[in-house]
Structures are given as C-alpha cells and as structure tokens.
Image (spheres, coloured by chain):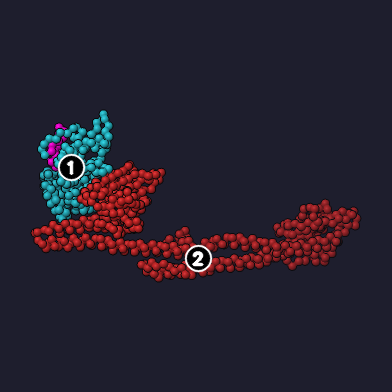
Chain colours: A cyan, B red
Amino acid sequence: MRVLIVEDEALIADGVRQGLVKAAFAADVVSSADAARAALQAENFDLAVVDIGLPREDGLQLLRSLRLRRHALPVLMLTARDGLNDRVTALDLGADDYLTKPFHIAELVARCRALIRRANSRSSSTLEFGALKLEIARKQACAFELPLDLTLREWSILECLVLNAGRIVGKSRLMSAVSDWSDELSPNAIEVYVSRLRAKLGDAACIRTVRGLGYRIDAPGK
Amino acid sequence: MRPANDPKNKPPSIRRRLFALLLIPTAAIAGAATYGAYRTALAPFEAAYDKALLDAALAIASNIEARDASGPTLSLTPDAVSVLRSDSLDTIYYRVSGDDGHFIAGDRDLPVPHQGVENPEFDDLTFGREPIRVVSYRVSSAHGGSIVTVAETRHKRDHARASVLRSSLAVDAAQLATALIVIWLGVEFAIEPLRNVERQLSARGSRDLEPLTTDGVPVEIRSLIDALNRLFGALQEAEIAERSFLDNAAHQLRTPLAGMLAHLELMAAGGAAIDGAQAQAALEGARRLARTAHQLLALARSDAASRSESLQEEISLPEVIKVCVEARLASADACGIDLGADFESAVTRGSAWMLEEALGNLTDNAIAATATGGSVTLRCGMTGGCAWFEVGDTGVGIPAAERAQVFERFYRASNARAAGSGLGLAIVREVARLHRAALTVEDGVDGRGTRVRMTFPEPAT
C-alpha cells in the first residue's frame, strides 16, 4: 500500500514517513500542492495524507482540485489549527478523515489502515483484517487461511465490525446489519451472536465489549 | 461645524437640568405672586380715584335745579366748571341728562353707562378713542329725575398701575435672580466632591487599582465611589489571576520542555546507540507538553468563544459520550481500567467541541485517579427536564474539603496520583459557566471514588 505525504514541515513529514514505513506502507513525501498533483498523475497511490497549512496553495485547495477532477483517492487531512470550521470544511470538501497536530503516530497509522480498507471494500471483493480474510461475494471468512463456519448473522456482524475496525459499533447498528425485514432481534440476541463469533474467531481477532456502547474489533496482540 | 458646537450634541449638564427643573416652577410662582400683589396694591388706588369722581358728580348734582315743569336745569358758573374740570393729568368730562336721556348740560357726546340698579353706577368706556372711567348718579325730584355723568381719562390711574407693577416686578425679579445665582454657585459647590474624585483618579497610574478613599465623601456620591471601588477590586483580582495563570502556565510548559531537552541532549551526545528509557522519558515529556498546550488553547478558545459563538447547536449527549470513550479506550486499556458508558437519551443546546472537551477532561482525570482493575463510567440522562452528564470512577476520590477548589486553574488535589497540568477541571468549569450548567462533585456509586456531574439548565421554550 502506497501513501503520498503532502507536508512542508520536514520534521513532521519525516516522522510520518518513518511511522508508515515501519507499519509496512510505502510512503513518499512532497512539500507542495503542485508537487502532489504531479506525483498523483505519475503514479498510483492508495491514500494521501495532506497538511492543511501548505505554503502558497493550501491543503484544502489541493483537496478541492482533486475532488473536482473526480479523483477518488482517500485523503486524510492534518492540521495544527484547531478551529472547528477547518474540520467541517475539510469533510465537506470530501476529506475522508481529519487529525489535529500533535497526534500519535500509532493513531495516524490506524486511521490510514482503516481508510485504505474502506476504500478497498468498495472496489474489491475481499476484506483483510489481521489474520482474517473476508470474501464479500461468497460471504465466506477465513482465519489463518482456514475457512470459518459462520452462520449468516455471525457473518453480517463480523463484516460490520471489520468494515468499522478500530471503532465502536453500537448494538443497534449491529441489529440493523443482522435483521432482515421479517424479524426483530433483541439486544440480548446480539450478545449471544457476538459471543459465538468470539469463540469461532479464536486468536484471529479480538472482539471487545465497550461497556454500555457496543463492540470493537481489534487485531490480536493490540 | 464641529460636533462640540452643534447644540443638538451638547453633553447633558447637571446645572442646565437643575435650571430647567427650578426655573419653570419658580417663575410661575413669582408670576402668580406678582399678579396677586399687584391686584391687592391697586384696589385702594382705584377706590380713591372712584371716590373723587363720585364727589365731582355729587357736586354737580347739588347744582341741579328743578323749579318748574320744563324740567331740571344746571346752574353752574364757568368758574365752577373750570374748577371741576381742573386736573393735572386727566381730562374731566361731564354731562347732565334727563331721566329719559335728553341732554341738559355739559359734554353732549359723553357716553352714559347703562343704567342698572346701582346708584352710583361705575363703568369703563371709551370717549373719542380714549379709555375713560365713568360714573353716573341719578337724582330724582318732583319735576322729573336727572342723571349726572362724570368721566375722566385714565392717565393717573395708569401711572399708579404702572408704578405698582414696577415695584412688585422688581422684587420678584430680584428673588428669581437670587435663586438662579444660588443654583449656579450651588451646583459648583455641590459637585466639588466629584472634582475631588476626578483629581484623585487622574493623579494615579494605570496600574494603580487601590480603592478610592470614602472619607468625607457625601452620601449622594458614596454609591458611585463604592461601584468604582468594586470595579477596581474586580480588575485587581483579574490581574492577580492573570499573573498567577501566566506563572503557572510558564511552569507547566517549561517543566516538560526542560525534561525533554535534557533527555534528548543525552541521546544526541550518546551517538548511534539510543537508550530506550531516555527515549521513553523524552516521549513522556513531549506528550505532557502537547496535552498542556492543547488545554491552554482550549481555555483561550472557550474564552474567545464566549464572546463569539452562540452555543446553540443541538447536541445529543450520548454522541458526546461515544466520542469521548472511543478516543480514550487505548489509554484506559493501558492503565487496565474498564472504561464504559451507561446512558439514556439526553439532548441539550451548546457547543459540541466544548462539551467534548469538558467530558474528555473529566474522563482523563477519572482514568488518572483510578487504580488498575477499577472502572470509569460515563453517564447521561434527563432529570426533571434538565439534561446532565457525569463521569464516575472507583478511584481515590477527592477529599470533601477540596471539592470546591478542584475547578480552579492549576489546582491539584493533595492526594492526586498522576502528574497533571491542573488545567483540566478549570476547562470543565469554564465550559459549565458558558453553558450555565451546574457542576457537582459527589462520592461515587457505593461511596467509592468520585462522581462529577454537569447539569444543564432546562431549555427555554
């Protein structure tokens, strides 16, 4: 997976690059909007990390010009300003995520992963999460390359959690992912499905309960 | 024209107001008094002149003779007539007529007053364009009655009238003038204490916020001085607070910076081999610095927001709780603390980022105060129409005596476990103030730990 970093502060650009490389991404750094457009034209990237505070043409303008050309590349915006307006503007212009400086590298890497995964789920037929591989068309999940025997409802819950990996997914959301029109599920039923799913996943992934809020899937060892 | 010269833009003046206030009633009273005095003083003059006029009529009447049926005649010598008509100022007229009105003697054209029941009859008429005072006296005899009319011009009456008017007007004008001079000087005298205050104020420097003295200050401006002193007090307090805030902020920023620099310098000097413990310490310092900078900015921002933002977004508190929990699961996990939520739907109006900031700070504090194996729970709900949220922990708790102080900037509880900036709860207090929300600190559920609750006011309908 290849990430384009658009950041004029060398210290931050280098830190981000090293962090991403360490997390097995390929990363390139450019320091202006023009250079970013040139790089995107020349090569394929899976994601761009764009600082809002670029010299001359700022990150928001770059984002606008990309979206005007129907460039669907996922974009994560970075900013040192904490005005709420920047965040709203960025998301309105089509940014996929937003981080305020200073941030933890681990957080940035996790968000990059999630963005790429989400983008892939739209275009490809498989979802990967740690040792898990989900084949969407066949509704078949594998752990450590071995197929898992999941019911349709367990599959739906796993798909919903993996699509939102790293985030809390509320019970009500899981309920609507699982139920079809014919039947209503109780929140307790979700608990039952989740505990069955946990048993079947074993060490491949960890579904943790966030008390009062829902569930979150984490890669093992985290 | 400069605005200062524009009569419409004249600044208000106490003196002018007093003048306007006093001049109208004073002048009205003086006018009424003058008129009364004038009328009173004039009556005897008029009576005396009328008496003299009647005397002349009676003198003429005594010279009317009615000897036969041809009617009464007047027997008056020319000397007597000239005596009768002699007057230094006025012209005297007379006319004698029969009781059927026919002319007998004197001035033929002299008008005769309407004969009513009175005898003599006085009247004010005009004769040859001149106002005259007229008296008629009816005489009756066996050979038919007659009417004696005597008139005089009004010159001496007018003289008397004018002199009476002059003297009473002079007295009143003097009174009025005295009153106005007293007001003019009195205002000057009365506002002298204000001038004193002004002198005191202009003599001091911009940093001098000592209270003004109230010695010898008249009661009327005492409240003004008190209000000024209250303002000075508040400014002084704000200045002290600002200074201590700066001191504290400097300390909070410099301490982690110094630690980071020390460790980084050691690492730089050590060359290629990087000491993991030193890197960890430098990282810790940087995180603390980042957090403090963030909190200082949040405080400054809420200060600015209090002047510009309307705080009218509709906010679902469970959403705020979800954002807070999500962002802190990792740090709670690292501390071995069970972070969770327990909420009912609750909606209030306010600023989303501020409420996230406040709840986040409460949550961070709760996590820091709780030992491994403990739990931190974020709750929200509605009670009696008021939305609230709270953070409960199973930590060390806050001593009851310190609960009021914990919301002060840079205050750190005596039994605080972890290093903190002391800004978190000050931000919470600021956010509560801006949202007119009440903050309460109570023992946690089962008497363990602490519960901090923010209760929002009932929405205005």
User: Which residue is depicted at the point 14% across and 51% down?
Assistant: A19
Which residue sits furthest right? B68
Q: Which residue is mark 2?
A: B219
Instruction: Say which chain tag 1 marks.
Output: A
What label sits on residue B333 in the rendered view? none
Query: What range is drawn magenta here?
Result: A128-143
The picture places residue B93, in percent across and down from the top left corner, at: 77, 61
Disc 1 secondary structure class: strand
Disc 2 secondary structure class: helix
Which residue sits furthest top? A182
Q: Is residue B36 left or right of residue B217?
A: right
Separation (CA) of disc 1 from disc 2: 78 Å
What label sits on residue A206 in the rendered view? 1
Q: Is residue B67 above or below residue B350?
A: below
Which quadrant, please, contains the N terminus of chain B?
A: bottom left
Q: Is residue B3 above or below residue A6?
A: below
Is B7 inside the magenta-drawn segment? no
Q: What secondary structure do most residues of the magenta stretch adopt?
A: strand
**Kind of residue sitting beneath label 2:** Val
Question: Of A154 and B115, which appears nearest the observer?
Answer: A154
Question: Of B151 and B169, which appears nearest the observer?
Answer: B169
Q: Is residue B411 left or right of residue B102?
A: left
User: Which residue is depicted at the point 48% across and 70% down?
Assistant: B216
The picture places residue A173, in percent across and down from the top left corner, at: 25, 38
**Kind of residue sitting beneath label 1:** Cys
Instruction: Say which chain tag 2 marks.
Output: B
Residue B280 in view in this figure: yes
Mark 2 surroundings within 10 Å by alpha-carbon count, few (fewer than 14), some (14 through 19), many (20 or more): few
Nearer the camera: disc 1 or disc 2 = 1
Is A131 inside the magenta-drawn segment? yes
Q: Is residue B236 left or right of residue B218?
A: left
